[in-house]
Amino acid sequence: MAVKSSHVHGIPPLTESRKWSIDGFLSKFYTRFKTQLGFASAAAFIYIGYANRDFSDLNAERGFGYALGIFALTCMLVLLVYPVRKRLKFLAFLGATRDWFRNHQVLGIIGPIAALYHCNFTLGSLNSRIALYSALVVAGSGIIGRFIYSKIFRGLNSRKASLKEMAAGMRSEFPECAQSMVFLPELVQRVAEFDKQVLSPPKSLLDCFALPFRLIYQTRKEQRRLAAFAKRKIIAESIYSPAIEADRRKIRKVTARYIARHLTQVRRVAEFTAYQRLFALWHKIHLPFFIVLVITVVVHVYAVHSY
């Protein structure tokens, strides 16, 4: 009996190892970009709903449109679980705080989208407008808070420790010629001077807002300056050192990588303090927004069912 070929139109069969490699790639891709994918999906749902609002038969007072309103209200109520769970330790049976924080973020996007579909992307009565605007403001505030939180997710001590490890890691890349590279202490000293310059904490709230943008320009400029300095020194020392001449390309590559990684890390350390202050301010603003949202939703539900 002839063996049936698994090739289709010249395409090789998907072996088990190849299948697992694809699964691993998709898993890594999702892990790295899941936040971006989530926001992109939310934007796509909003665009589709808005673009088709004139062709939709959704009605906020009955049917699926009414059900979406109930779903949006449920999302708003479940959002309350995270702040309550975080403050009341005896509610530990409800689950881990980090899980509720993740649910809080997801429902904070899904709820307002459901509310937009509930009203079919049109403005109704005054109380419904206020409730919708409050939901959108809270959702927008949550997105800003999520961005700031991502900047301070790793602790400050962890970031500072990474800075100290980099110089030692640089020398370990090429130990056979590190003794000949007399310019290394000068390079490290120049990097330390830049660190001292940018690591001074911001003095005002305005400085906190401006610091991340200012540091992007400063670190890029300093990276070019240090890379040019290292290049000149490596060329000069390679004339007198056969070891450096033999590994000149590798030394330049390692030195450039060290400079880029160090400046990126020091920028993140400098940003940490600024984002920490912004996050504290955001907390003070986000909570009143959320309280207003709860009040406006309660008023909206009462008005809809009473009049």
Image (tube, rainbow, N blue to C red):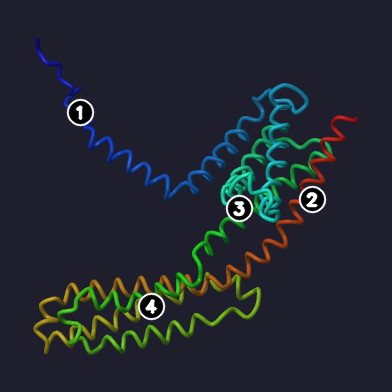
Mark nearer the N terminus (4 vs 2): 4
Q: Which residue is mark 2?
A: 292
Q: Are marks 2 and 3 in contact (CB under 8 Å)?
A: no
Query: Image check: 57 left or right of 194?
Result: right
Tag 4: amino acid: Lys
Q: Secondary structure at mark 2?
A: helix
Mark nearer the N terminus (2 vs 1): 1
In the rendered structure, find residue 164 and report the number of the disc placed on it: 4
At which x and y percent is residue 232?
23, 84
Q: Secondary structure at mark 4?
A: helix
Mark nearer the N terminus (3 vs 1): 1
Tag 2: amino acid: Val
Q: Which residue is mark 3?
A: 143
Tag 3: amino acid: Ile
Residues at marks 2 and 1, CA–CA distance in whole angstroms: 58 Å
Query: Image check: 299 left or right of 203?
Result: right
Q: Residue at x 73, y 27 (%)?
A: 66
Q: Are marks 2 and 1 in contact (CB under 8 Å)?
A: no
Q: Farthest right residue?
A: 307
Relative vertical location of residue 168 with respect to residue 84 in this rendering, above or below: below
Q: Nearer the viewer, mark 4 or mark 2?
A: 4
